[in-house]
Structures are given as structure tokens and as C-alpha cells.
Amino acid sequence: MTALQWVFSFLKKYRFRLITALFLVTISCLLTIINPYISGIIVDDVIKGGKRGILPKLVLLLIGTTIFRSLIKYRFLVIFETTSQNMLYSMRDYVYRRFLQEDFNFYNKNRTGDLMSRQTGDMEAIRHFVAFVIYSVYENSLLFIIALVMIFTVDFRLALCMIAVIPITVLLTRKQLSSVKAAFHNIRQRFSSLNTFVQENVSGNRVVKAFAKEDYEIQKFNRENDAYRDAELSAAAIWKKYVPIFEFLANFLTVILYLAGGIMVIKGYITLGKMVTVSGYLWMLNNPLRMAGWLANDYQRFVTSAEKIYATIKEEPGIKTPDNGVKAKRFQGNLEFKHVNYRADDDVILRDINFKVKPGQTVGIIGATGSGKSTLMNLLCRFYDVTDGEITIDGVNLKDMDLYQLRSNIGMAMQDVFLFSDTIEGNIAYGSPNCSLEEVIEAAKVANAHDFITAMPEGYDTIVGERGMGLSGGQKQRISLARALLKNPSIVVLDDTTSAVDMETETQIQEQLHSLSDKTVFIIAHRISSIKDADQILVLDNGRIIESGNHESLIQKKGYYYTVFNHQYGEFDRYVNGNLKEVVC
Ligand code: ATP
Ligand code: MG
């Protein structure tokens, strides 16, 4: 399917409305024949022929035709406008749904500003095409043909003079279309880039201020702004070349008419009334010529935007829910990674990962930064697919499971906490919008967030997120934890969720988490204190599990975990002959 076929597939639904509207355009164009024709009769029969009696009827006919034509025009304009809005509504909805279906790789590849441009500026170019360009091209072509036919009926020699400009117009329009194409692609690119820049700078304004980089950012913005303006100007430079030629041709037609027509009237080949009729049709020839350049521009703008949108969404998401995927309301929590490898862009991120987890177990994951801890959990949620091997839950391969059921069974507090511009209650209840305030409070208590939330003037109604009140890193983490727990998932993933909270709060959170014995819990952490009570601890290094076991057995091993433990606690003297004494964390 091409980009244009894709766009027109959204118009299919409205084809009867569009045909009706085009029919009305045809009637409106045909009505334009009447007024110049009557003007000719007024000159020949009323003014020159003295038949004054028919004048009132002719004037009434003139007025009536004008009113009727205006009403028809109003009607078809409304149809085109509403069709364009409705079609755009469906298209925006489709594209947005597609954005939501896309996987992490899609968002790694596409910049936010680009995606926003697809949903705004590019959509507008498509709306303009449907609301204006379609009928304008049809109306102008029809007016031109009708005018030529009518002039033919008056005098074929005069019509032939007028036709002389058609080949030049067609040639010029084609040339303009092809030369402006690259310029419009450049404009869309620059617009996306400008959008991305503004979006990033507004989101990252705290970093800009912290590094006092305002001047530097202004210079960068100016470069983006200049590039966008230059792209628009170079497109304008192209049509600047063509528009005067079209304008000249339009005016030249007037000259041809008055010159050739005048000579014919003088020589008596045609009457003055016929000449008046022909000059009444002149605008129907002039207007299409004047519009040709603009419409070619609008058409190319539309094609470019359609191609941009289609290119963004045409590839099927890499990760999709399988047809008839296995659905499980609730997992038992038997989980297994079997010889899992994960590569991204030829880089091996995880290699030969093997482990089993029993229902209700807590698994701690520790390892140097960049060792693959978050990636391991991203594979579990199928944000990415394993390159080799398989992951099973309750014996079912993740790839055979219904994707939405899988994710609704997992409650994840991500490493990068993101809160929506909403109340604290709304943020916690994000995954379970139908829950009661009591349930929200319950989850907040488990996440040790209830006390600081109630200490705020507006409590659970406090607006947070982008336009809301500032929260500390630890407070955001606890809201994110409450959000993950409120879903009551069978598997909980906490990715560095307590890294920003103090040790005492962390201990309290852990005590609360211990009470969730019906859940399989993964805790990713850098602090030994966060994971030491886990049933199983996986130590990752450079994408491999280098050690696994519980806290005691790992200490006995005296490997990586042991070294980290000693770095964090400095308790060398507590170990005598390799025997672990009780450690107070
Ligand atoms: P941290 O403790 O800092 O959170 P981590 O152990 O969670 O680190 P990951 O986020 O899993 O580390 O990343 C592991 C490695 O994989 C890193 O080197 C990272 O750059 C790389 N990586 C992760 N995802 C991708 C991806 N989609 N494409 C390319 N590289 C990736
Ligand atoms: Mg991580």
C-alpha cells in the first residue's frame, strides 16, 4: 500500500458524501454559465435591440442564479470541511493507537518531537487537502473546461487563441510539482527537528538552568529556527519562480481576448453582446491559472505529510500479541529463563541467562551499572523479545501469551519514574482506575508513601507530574511503587525503586513487601540491604549471571557479591574463618 492509498482508505467511508459534494460543485460551475450569457443578451437585445420589457426578468434571473449558486457553494464547503474533520479524527485516532501499540524499539528510534509533528502539522496538511485542495482542483478544472466550451459556442477562433496557454500551464505545473517535492521534505524534517528541540529543552529546562546554558541553548535554538525558516524560504523561492508566470498567463488571456475579440467585433464576426459574454467567462479561465501554482504547492505539501505519517506507522510493531494467545487471569508465578540471549544492534546485552523462580519467591538482582539488570526485566515484560532461548511463566512461553494479560499480571516500578500530570490518587490508581480511595491508601501505606502524602495540603488530591507540585526522588519512587502494587499483580518488578529512599524507610518498605507472600517479587538494586533477604540473588556482570544463591551462600563464595558487601558495609572484621556473623543493616 502506498502512502496515498493509505490516506484515501480513510476517505472511503465518506465517498457518498464526497460524490454528493462534487456533484454540487458541478452544479455550481454549470450555473456560472448563466450570468455571462444573460449579460450578453442584455447588451444585444435590451441595450441595442431595445427590448426593455425583458430586463426585469433577466435581472431577477441574474440575482436568483447568484443566490442559488452561493447556497450550493455554502453546502459543499460545509460537506468538505466536516468530512475533512471527521476523516482526520479517525486518522489521528488510528495513528495514536498505533503509537500505543509500538514497542520500545520504535520509541528508541523515533524522537518525541517527530511523533508530535506527525500528529499535528502533518495531519493539518492532510485536512487542508481534503477540505480545500480536492474541490478546488475539481472546481477550477471544470470552470476552465466550461468556459472554453462556452467560448467555443461563441466563436471557435477566439477559443483556439485561449487554448494556446493550456500546454504551457500543464508543463509548468508538472515542473513545479517535481521541483518543490524535495523542498517540502526538507521543511517537514526541519519542522520535526525544531519541535524535538523545543520539547527536549522545555522538559530539560532544569538541567539547562543548572548548567547556566541558556545562551548556548538560545544559539542552538536559533540554528534550528534559521534552518526551518530557510527551508520554508527555499520552498517559497521555487513557487516564487512559477507564480508570476501563472499570473502573467492569466493576464495574458485578458489581453488575447480583448485584442482578438475586439478585432472580431470591429470586423463584425461577432456581436458586442457575444464579446461581453466571452469576457464574463474570462475569470473562469484566469482563476484556474492563478490557482495552479498554489494548488500544486498544497498538493505537494499533502503528499509529503502523507508519506511522513505513513512511513512512521507502516511497519508492524515488532512485538505483538499472538492470535489466540494464552490468557491467564492470574499467574501462579513459576518462572523460568532458559538459555536466554539478547542482542541489540549486534551488541550482546544478555548471554545464556538461566534461572528458575518458584511462586511467591523474592529474587534480588544486583550487578554493576550497565550489566543488564533492567534489560532482564524488560524481556520479562516483553518490552523486547529474546534473541535466543525462551522465558516461560507457568510453563507457557511468553511469546505464546496474550501480551496484555501478561503485562497486567506484572506490576512494574520502573527505574525512570514517570508521573502523569494528575493527582497523586490518579497516578497511583493508573493501572486500576476503578479502585476505591481506600485501596489507593492501602497501596500507599505498603509503599510507605501514605504519611508524606497526607502531610501535603491537598493530600491525595495534590497534582503532581509535569505541571504539578515538585516531589523528591524518593517520594516519586514510592508513588511509583504504590502504583505497581495497587494492580495486585502476581509478579512485582522493582527496578531500583528504593535507591532514593533512606535506609530506614527502605527497611519499612521491605517489611511491608514481605507480607505480599502471594506475589513473585523481583528487586533490582545496587544496595545489598535491598536484596539480602531475597530467596534467590542473581549477580549480573556484563550480561551474564556470574553468581546466584541466597545472601549467606554468596557471602561464603567470596566472589563479586562478597566484595560488594564488604565495600558497602566495611565489615571485614565480622567474618572470622569465613563464618558470617549477624549483620545489622
Ligand atoms: P543500571 O544499573 O545503570 O540501571 P542495568 O544493569 O539496568 O544498569 P541495562 O539498562 O539493562 O543496565 O543496560 C545494559 C546494557 O545494554 C547497557 O550497556 C545499555 O547501553 C545496553 N542497552 C540496553 N537496552 C538497549 C537497547 N535497546 N539498545 C541498545 N543497547 C541497549
Ligand atoms: Mg537499570
Image (cartoon, helix red, strand yellow):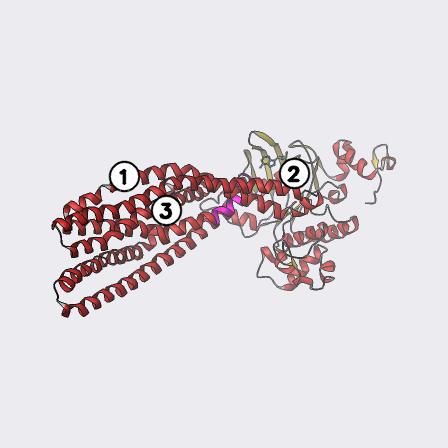
Q: Earlier in the sequence, mark 1 or mark 2?
A: 1
Numbered tag placed on residue 96 in the rendering: none
x, y percentage for residue 512?
A: 72, 54
Magenta-colored segment: predominant secondary structure? helix
| SS under mark 2 | helix
Q: Earlier in the sequence, mark 3 or mark 2?
A: 3
Q: Nearer the viewer, residue 22 or 171?
A: 171
x, y percentage for residue 527?
A: 75, 41
| SS under mark 1 | helix
* Three-letter code for the amino acid on which mark 1 is drawn: Ile
Nearer the observer, disc 1 or disc 2?
Answer: 1
- Residue picked out by circle 2: 373
Q: Which contiguous range is marked in magenta?
A: 106-120
- Residue picked out by circle 1: 168
Numbered tag placed on residue 294 in the rendering: 3
Would you say residue 401 is visible in this rendering? no
Please indicate whether residue 355 sits to the left or right of residue 527 in the image.
Answer: left
Q: Nearer the viewer, residue 398 or 382?
A: 382
Residue positioned 21% across, 67% down in the render: 59
> Does residue 405 show up magenta in the picture?
no
| SS under mark 3 | helix
How many other residues sit within 10 Å of disc 2, few (<14), some (14-19) or many (≥20)? many
x, y percentage for residue 215?
A: 66, 42
